[in-house]
Image (cartoon, rainbow, N blue to C red):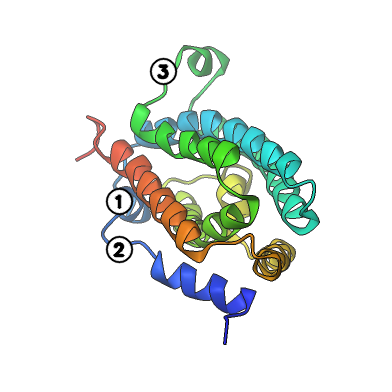
Amino acid sequence: MAPTAAELLENTTAQLAPDPHANPLVPLIARGEAPRDTLATLALEQQWVIPADRAAFLHLARRAAEEPEAAAYFEMLAEGESLARERLRPFASACGIDEARSRAYAPLPGCQAYPAYVAWLALNASPADTVLAITANFSAWGGYCAQIARALRLHYGFKDEACAFFDFFARPAPELDRTARAAVQAGLDAGTLSEERAHAYGRLLQSYEAMFWSTLSTLPSLP
């Protein structure tokens, strides 16, 4: 019997779960051992990631015009990026980033590989496959954000407003999950979803996310 959308999402998320040692930076932040300069670089990189991902999700929503469930999923993701962008500003400010520093910042290739690949998916991958790959990847990202949010309060003295960006991604999103299941199920029913392709896309997303964190962990200011 073919798996349901819920089963496929659960299985794919489990299969693509990153190695616990794949992220060298978040444990340092969790212990309060990452320098504030590294937190500032994280904020500066996210200032590039967020608008890029938003544009990719809007493009996917347009491409999915004949797949309303997938279109709704990508529209929700794009709206989430808009909300995240607003919440990123207080974090950046708490890290000492002003307008001049943001304008002068040169992003790191290893950190921008992830949004570049999301843009590749927006241009080349089927919407249904992309829903499955991105949903599986988000599980790890949410866990990282939860750890960072706790550490910012506990070790760095950040106020709630400065932690809101990470709180936003850490909290459950039942409506987004429901929409993802509907989109995956519609892809299964229509025969437009390839588990093999989606798994390959998800594996690359996880690899590029690991590259994001490992790039930040190699900054000169880190121990």
Residue 182: image x %, image y %? 73, 67
Which is more foreground, mark 3 or mark 2? Answer: 2
Q: Residue furthest front?
A: 191
180 to 161, vertically: above or below: below
Q: In what quadrant of the picture does the N terminus appear?
A: bottom right
Q: Are marks 1 and 2 in contact (CB under 8 Å)?
A: no
Q: Which residue: 63% across, 44% down?
A: 161
Separation of residues labelled 3 and 1 (CA atoms): 24 Å
Under mark 3, the amino acid is: Ala
Q: Of helix, strand and loop, which one carries label 2?
A: loop
Tell me if 157 is positioned left or right of 35 in this view: right
The answer to whether any part of residue 185 appears in the image is yes
Query: For mark 1, does the 10 Å Cα neighbourhood hold few (<14), some (14 to 19), or many (20 or more) residues?
Result: some
Residue at which label 3 appears:
106
Near-viewer residue (110 or 60): 60
Residue 65: image x %, image y %? 79, 46
Which is more foreground, mark 3 or mark 1? Answer: 3
Q: In what quadrant of the picture does the C terminus appear?
A: top left
Query: For mark 2, does the 10 Å Cα neighbourhood hold few (<14), some (14 to 19), or many (20 or more) residues?
Result: few
Q: Which residue: 70% across, 48% down?
A: 74
Under mark 2, the amino acid is: Asp
The answer to whether any part of residue 151 appears in the image is no
Q: Of helix, strand and loop, which one carries label 1?
A: helix
Separation of residues labelled 1 and 2 (CA atoms): 16 Å
N-term-proximal mark, 3 vs 2 = 2
Which is more foreground, mark 1 or mark 2? Answer: 2
Residue at which label 2 appears:
19
